[in-house]
């Protein structure tokens, strides 16, 4: 859901209400519709650290590939 932007932006624009408002669309709206660049920047950094944490957990708990016959 961190990569969903295009479908939500084109199809509904985040509506009706905020039913299809994803984080990337919220960042876009704050930056370019409401001209709150600082708030959008902070939201982007928060999303970056969330994705970084998920990536770390994925690498930490995934098993590394081991090939017995590799030279």
Image (cartoon, grey):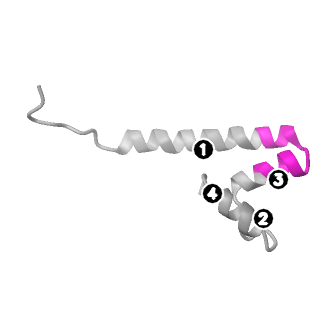
Secondary structure beneath dot 4 equals loop
User: Could you tell which of marks 3 and 4 lies nearer the N-terminus?
Assistant: 4
* Residue drawn at (70%, 51%) of the image: 24
Q: Nearer the viewer, mark 2 or mark 1?
A: 2
Secondary structure beneath dot 3 equals helix
Q: Is residue 35 left or right of residue 6?
A: right
**Pointer 4 residue:** 4
Mark 3 crowd level (few <14, some 14–19, many ≥20, 10 Å Cα): some
* Residue drawn at (89%, 43%) of the image: 36
User: What's drawn in magenta, residue-wise?
Assistant: 27-41
Measure the alpha-carbon separation of dots 2 and 1.
Answer: 24 Å
Mark 2 crowd level (few <14, some 14–19, many ≥20, 10 Å Cα): some
**Pointer 3 residue:** 29
Say if 32 sits above or below 7 in the image.
above
Measure the alpha-carbon separation of dots 4 and 2.
Answer: 12 Å
Q: Are marks 2 and 3 in contact (CB under 8 Å)?
A: no
Q: Is residue 6 left or right of residue 63?
A: right
Secondary structure beneath dot 1 equals helix
**Pointer 1 residue:** 50
Figure quadrant of residue 65: top left
């Amino acid at each position: 859901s961190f990569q969903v932007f295009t479908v939500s932006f084109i199809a509904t624009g985040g509506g009706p209400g905020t039913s299809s408002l994803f984080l990337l669309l919220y960042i876009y709206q704050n930056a370019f519709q409401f001209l709150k660049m600082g708030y959008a920047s902070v939201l982007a950094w928060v999303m970056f650290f969330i994705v970084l944490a998920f990536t770390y957990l994925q690498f930490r708990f995934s098993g590394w590939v081991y090939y017995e016959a590799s030279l």
